[in-house]
Each structure stands twice: as C-alpha cells, then as structure tokens.
Amino acid sequence: MTDPVTQKIGQAGEVTMLASTPNDPVHILAFHGGGGVAGTPDMMVPFAQRVTAGPGVTMALARYRTLNADQASFEDMRADAAQALDWAQAQIPAGGRLYLLGASFGGLLALDALLEASAEVQEHVTGLILLNAVTDTGPDGFANRVIKPEDHGHLSPIARLKGHPMLSRLRCFLAHGGQDDVVPIDVSHRFAALWPKDRCEMMPFPNSSHGFFNRAPHDKTVAAAVRKFVGATPIEPKRTGSTGLLPKGATMVYGIGAQKAGTSWLFDYLKQSEESHTVHIKELHYFDALYVKSEQSHLNNRLAQLRRAVDNLTPGMDPANRKRLRDTQLLAERLSIHAAAPGDHRPYVEYMTKGYAGQKIICDFTPSYCTLDAEGFREMDSLGPAKFIFILRDPVDRLWSQIRMAIGAQNPTLSDAAYEAKCVAHAQDLRDKRDIARIPRADYARTMEALEAAVPSDHIHYAFYEDLFSQDSVDEICAFLDIRPHKVAGDKRVNLGRSTVLPDAVEQMLSEALAPQYQAVRARFGDSVPAAWRESVVPLSKKAPQAFSEKAVRLLTGFGDN
C-alpha cells in the first residue's frame, strides 16, 4: 500500500489515490458521504487504507463540489461524479476491473454517474459497492438541503434501476447498519430486492449506526468483505482486543442471555463452585455498552448513580459518610472498566480478576450481551479462552416476564387490576409499534447467527430455561465448563418479579408476532425444544371465541379495570 497521493483530473476535479502495488487488477472509484452539504475524500482515507492493505487493489477517492464549501448544486455534484467515472474508465488497464463505491450520499452519486454514463463506460464497470448508501430520493426517500423529492425524485436510483439490463450483468455488495437513522436499512433491503439473487450480496450490521464501516470495530470487517467481493487476496480481520489478558489457566464464561431466562439462577449456582470466580455484581454491562447504541444507557445510569452518591456526602464529621464513601468507591470501581481507549480491555479484565485465586472460570453474566453482533462476540472471545452460554425460554413467556418486570419497576404500588392492565397495554404498544420478533433481546435467531459467526461451536452451550433447574441440566453445563458439578438445591428461581395471568388474547397476539422465533428454534433444535414451549401459532381470527375470557378482551381493547 502506498501513501495517499492527490492528482488533478480535468480542469477542476481531483482524486486521492491509494494503491497496493503497481498495475493492480482491481480499481475502485469511491465517492464519500456528507449529504452533498459537506465532506471530503479525507473522510474515507482510513477505510481505503484498509482495503488497499493487501495486494491487488487501487482506490481513487473522488472529490466533488459540495454545498457548504463551493455553494454547489446537485447538478454540479452529478457533473463532478460523471467526470470522475470517465477518468477512471480511461485508467483501467487491459484485463482490469472497475468497481464503483459509494458511501451514504456518495452512493447516490456513484449510481447516478453509472446510469448517466455512455454504454462504453458502463461496459467497463464490473460491480457496485454501496455502504449505507442513499438509493431512494423519491417521495418517502432521502431528503435534505441538497436533495428535494419534488426536484430529484425522478433521479431516484431505486426507481431507475428497476428492471434495468445492468442488474443481470453487474454485481452488487451492500453493507448497512440496522440502527441507521440517516438512511434506514430497509432502503438497502428494497434496493437489494431489485437484483437477481446471485448478483447482489447484502451484509447487515444490526447494531450499527450510519457510517459504521469507517469506525472500529467494523472497519476491518467491511474492508475484508470488500476485498473478498472484488476477488482480491483476502485479509482476515485481526482481533482488536488484547489477546491473552486472562490469567493462565482461566476461562472467561459469558452468560449472554436471554433476559428473564434464568441467568441469575445459573450465575448463583456457579458462584457457589470453588472452581468459579465472580465479582460482587452479576451484570457488568461492559461489551453491550461498548458496541450497542441502545444499551449505552447502562453506562449513563452508572455515571448518574455516582454523581448522586457524591452529592450525598456531607461535610465535616459524619459516621454515615462511611457507607456513602463505600458506595462511591464501589461505583467508581465499577465504572473503571470503561476508563480506557477503545480496544483496550485491560481495565475490564483487572476488575473481573480482582480477588482471583486460580479458579478455572471467571464469570460475566450480562443478558443484554445477546444484543451484540458478530464483531462484538469476536471481541469478547479475543481476551483469552472463552465460553458462551445462551439460555432460551419460550418466547411468549420470556417477553411477558420482561413486560411484567418493566411495569413492576416503573409502577411498584399499582393494584393488581391496574398492574395487569398496564402490562397488557404495554404488550399491545410493543405489537403496534415494533416487529416483536426482531426486538434484539427477543431475536434468538439473530443472536445465534451472530454468535456462531464469531465463536467456535464447541465454545457455545445452548440451554433451555424450562429444563434449566435440574441436576441433569447443570451437569451438562458444568461438563461444558470443565468444572465439578454440585447438587442443585431445589428449583428456587431468582428475580421472579410480580406475577399476573397472561390473558388469552394477549397470548395469541404475542404468539403470532413471535412465530418466526418459534420456527427458527424448532428448525435448529428439533425434538430438543421442551414440550412446554407453545406448539403452534393459531391466527387470532381462527381461534374459538370461547377461548377468550371476558376480562382478557376488556384488557386487550383498553377497557380494563382501573
């Protein structure tokens, strides 16, 4: 890989060149993002350096005029992109392959330049690489100060490419973050649906926001995927963590969920083993706060707790300060795991190994780790020897338990009737506003797919909540962890929370919504799925009316008792 070199093209244009070696067979012309309002090729240099880190790939990062820097119109930007494509086509040596890469707004420019190019230029383009790209400028698509649907809707690539002959000749690679609030991932799913299945590859990153490909931990993974897509020599992404941080002979055991599926009970069981080391709290919320945007609230809550604890300290001589200072110290130690640069997990390991005395396993049981994607699990696995336990519970029962816990925590003094009504209302609200089967903590299939993409299968143990509280089940878990089992003391549950009956109508509604999870788990585990799991999903309209209690119908329709 050479250092970036900027060169002029035409009278006003320029590109920043990065090359692996002279005469590379693969050439990528890339357009940066910024909404057309701002942005420069420099934004993409770190990512381009990763793509060109191995042999065979040259990248040219095109500069185009923008609104803020040049008072440019979209027509100016289109002209700059077209000029860059003409220049790139002329540079390709005999036998070379040209790919167009567009990031965000740059995807719109790359697609527009291709669609507007001459047949000769189009023939020289082998494929498209689109990273959280703008592909829809129609009435419900992307709009900002540069792009207005009334002016630019007719240029929407998703409409212009529908049925286009190029779809059967070109190849396309899409990468998109599931938490993108600038260009929703559904846009890329719709764009991918235009293509023949064997011509388009979609790589989703469920927990990532806009621009994820240019930041750790996904930059290396996406760069490696791009190299693979263009047929260059693969460069496997290296682990970003500090491999070998654990004490010699220790294995990190991660209980990654599911929420309300017995992880607290299992943690308490393992805590009693002489071969197990645990810290004084069960859920560290370390990796989820690092890699899942929606889970960063755990870190914010701890910071708020520490501020309150400090504020509670009184001046002068006060015996009560002893406990307050101890609470402050514990909170500060707990927050110390985050006091490091990204990728440096030493503070986390130091916290986890405080008081360690040579035990075989070190336990971090944080159910919301199930929301991580493959990169997050790969990072967890990088600290040293690691094993992962994922407990699955009947999806409806698990979600209803989660709902009861949330409502009980928010409203601890409600009467039984009011509590039940709020639980039902919350379930209905979830069903109306979200795809329940794709809620990160409910999406068993996604968690298993991500985990197995990052961790060797013999380092993963799946268990079922319905079978968990038995000697046979914990014996299997202890064998997996290579520790001696001890006797299960009954089937005492932990953190059961307030109970209430699941109304038939709500059960039916949740069963229908969670049908994809039932299907995925049964397809994976077959007869191993406990008999207690719901066997089938019957459409609400086909269920016998007598199956619904009058009270359940009142609750579901909003007429419950106050």
Image (tube, grey):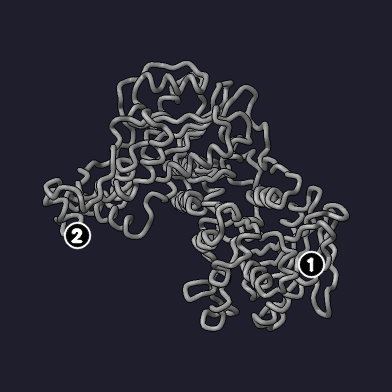
Residue at the location (54% across, 37% down)? Answer: 452
Q: How many marks?
A: 2
In-front residue for pair 160/486: 160
Choose top left, top right, bottom left or bottom right for residue 132: bottom right
In-front residue for pair 365/87: 87
Q: Quadrant of the C terminus?
A: bottom left
The amino acid sitting under disc 1 is Ala
Position of residue 345 relative to residue 360, above or below, is below
Q: Percent x, y for residue 33?
A: 65, 67
Q: Earlier in the sequence, mark 2 or mark 1?
A: 1
Q: Which residue is mark 1?
A: 88
Q: Nearer the viewer, mark 2 or mark 1?
A: 1
Q: In the image, which disc is placed on residue 101?
A: none
Badge 2: how crowded within 10 Å, few (<14), some, or many (20+)?
some
Position of residue 17 relative to residue 142, above or below, is above
Q: Percent x, y for residue 293?
A: 52, 54
- Note whether residue 418 is visible: yes
Residue at the location (83% across, 65% down)? Answer: 91
Q: Percent x, y for residue 144?
A: 56, 76
Q: Which residue is mark 2?
A: 558
- Note whether residue 310 is visible: no
Position of 421 with respect to 439 (left or right) is: left
Q: CA distance from mark 2 to mark 1?
A: 62 Å
Q: Percent x, y for residue 77?
A: 69, 77
Disc 2 is placed on an element classified as: loop
The amino acid sitting under disc 2 is Gly
Choose top left, top right, bottom left or bottom right for residue 38: bottom right
Position of 448 with respect to 169 (left or right) is: left
Disc 1 is placed on an element classified as: helix
Position of residue 327 relative to residue 489, above or below, is below
Position of residue 144 relative to residue 272, above or below, is below
In-front residue for pair 500/137: 137
